[in-house]
Image: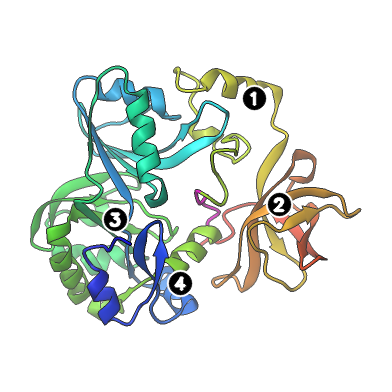
């Protein structure tokens, strides 16, 4: 089991630690609901240093990225980030990720922790053009400082005007007394804030200064359980639940980051799938009757026919209702459609709703 550079701090803080993607990670500190509300209404900090970071550099860097990514990286300017996925050759998804353009011929790819080795092997296999690759995952830490008070709480730690960094943009700047830190206006919560990339040797200093600066704003450490409820309220996909090697990116609603203006892995088949029309669709739903939907539960229509399955589900703390994501047949995917979630062999009434569930 790997530790992050901050594991000892989480343990000192009394966090409940769990194994996650090969790492010893804090799942909660004071409880999911309280931590969730801290991020929605104030500011909280996640240690997400288990995420993977790859540097792709050199004259062939863009060629490789264009081949493996569903999105169009030629649209990236220096200091901009882009959400995308790696398509596999069978119509599924190797991983979803964020690409950061640091400068011409230098890109940072941030991938899911559970897929670091798989993704690295996949990119290496596709790198027939000779782009330079470096896996820096074990050298770097990542903090997500999230919530509506994040800008105000963190402004004293940097010479950068945080309010001027637009969503999915980033700066390489000073932060908490450390030079050359990536301050990125990205996150997985839907409540605004920043993600801070730094070296492992620097993260403890940054963590301490972040908590010092945020003290008057009620800043708190937040675990992975609240990260999951926050992302689900936004309808964001989680790899391994809502998308994987077998799920179609078009059925998962990722057509908006699938750019057919270029050739990429499996683009011809995905284009054909788009033209012929998808059969299933990832939908958001909320329960009408009592119960909590969980991954793997079957979804039925009013006649009891199985039409799909739940991929993510929870009791949403901000909404005080049970919500979920799941795949259903296209005929049953329209908003307000009545569906039934099979909870312990009992059909529980639900309806299809538009995401995000949480409107802020």
- Residue 74, horizontal then vertical, whole percent: 33, 24
Residue that mark 2 sits on: 309
Q: Which residue is drawn at 24% across and 80% down?
A: 216
Q: Residue 273 carries which label?
A: 1
> Which region of the structure is painted magenta?
234-239
CA gap between label 2 and label 4 equals: 26 Å
Q: Between tags 2 and 1, which lies in front? A: 2
Residue that mark 3 sits on: 195
Q: Between tags 3 and 1, which lies in front? A: 1
- Residue 293, horizontal then vertical, whole percent: 67, 64
Q: Main secondary structure of the magenta part?
A: loop
Instruction: Work out whether 239 lies above or below 175.
Output: above
Disc 1 crowd, CA 10 A, few/some/many (<14, 14-19, 20+):
some
Of label 2 and label 1, which has the lower sequence position? 1
Of label 3 and label 1, which has the lower sequence position? 3
Disc 2 crowd, CA 10 A, few/some/many (<14, 14-19, 20+):
many
- Residue 29, horizontal then vertical, whole percent: 38, 78
Q: Going by the image, does 348 lie left or right of 122?
A: right
Q: Please, what secondary structure does the residue beneath circle 1 have? A: helix
Q: Which residue lies furthest to the front in this view?
A: 1
Instruction: Work out whether 282 lies above or below 319.
Output: above
CA gap between label 3 and label 2 equals: 33 Å
Q: Please, what secondary structure does the residue beneath circle 4 have? A: helix
Based on the picture, tell me whether residue 50 belongs to the magenta stretch: no
CA gap between label 3 and label 1 equals: 35 Å
Q: Residue 36 carries which label?
A: 4
Of label 3 and label 2, which has the lower sequence position? 3
Q: Which residue is drawn at 34% across and 70% down?
A: 44
Of label 2 and label 4, which has the lower sequence position? 4
In contact (CB < 8 Å): disc 3 and disc 1: no
CA gap between label 2 and label 1 equals: 21 Å
Q: Between tags 1 and 4, which lies in front? A: 1
């Amino acid at each position: 089991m790997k530790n992050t550079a901050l594991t000892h701090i989480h343990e000192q803080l009394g966090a409940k630690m769990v194994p996650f993607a090969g790492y010893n990670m804090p799942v909660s500190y004071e409880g999911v609901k309280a931590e969730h509300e801290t991020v929605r209404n104030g500011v909280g900090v996640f240690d997400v240093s288990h995420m993977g970071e790859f540097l792709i550099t050199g004259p062939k860097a863009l060629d490789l990225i264009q081949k493996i990514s569903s999105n169009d990286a030629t649209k990236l300017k220096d200091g901009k980030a882009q959400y995308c996925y790696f398509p596999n050759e069978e119509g599924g998804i190797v991983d979803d990720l964020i690409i950061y353009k640091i400068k011409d011929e230098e890109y940072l790819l941030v991938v899911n922790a559970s897929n670091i080795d798989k993704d690295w092997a996949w990119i290496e296999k596709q790198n027939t053009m000779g782009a330079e690759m470096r896996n820096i995952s074990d050298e770097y830490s990542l903090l997500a400082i999230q919530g509506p008070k994040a800008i105000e709480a963190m402004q004293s730690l940097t010479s950068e005007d945080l309010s001027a960094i637009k969503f999915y943009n980033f700066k390489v700047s000073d932060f908490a007394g450390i030079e050359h830190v990536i301050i990125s206006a990205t996150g997985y919560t839907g409540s605004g804030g920043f993600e801070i990339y730094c070296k492992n040797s620097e993260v403890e200093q940054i963590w301490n200064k972040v908590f010092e600066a945020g003290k008057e704003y009620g800043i708190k450490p937040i675990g992975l359980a609240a990260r999951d409820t926050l992302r689900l309220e936004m309808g964001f996909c989680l790899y391994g639940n809502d998308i994987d090697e077998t799920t179609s990116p078009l059925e998962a609603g990722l057509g908006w980051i699938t750019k057919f203006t270029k050739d990429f892995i499996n683009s011809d088949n995905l284009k054909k799938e788009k033209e012929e029309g998808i059969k299933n669709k990832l939908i958001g739903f909320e329960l009408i009757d009592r119960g909590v939907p969980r991954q793997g539960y079957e979804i039925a229509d009013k006649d009891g026919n199985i039409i799909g399955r739940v991929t993510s589900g929870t009791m949403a703390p901000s909404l005080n209702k049970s919500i979920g994501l799941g795949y259903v047949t296209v005929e049953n995917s329209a908003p307000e459609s009545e569906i039934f979630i099979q909870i312990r062999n009992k059909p529980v009434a639900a309806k299809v709703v538009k995401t995000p569930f949480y409107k802020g």
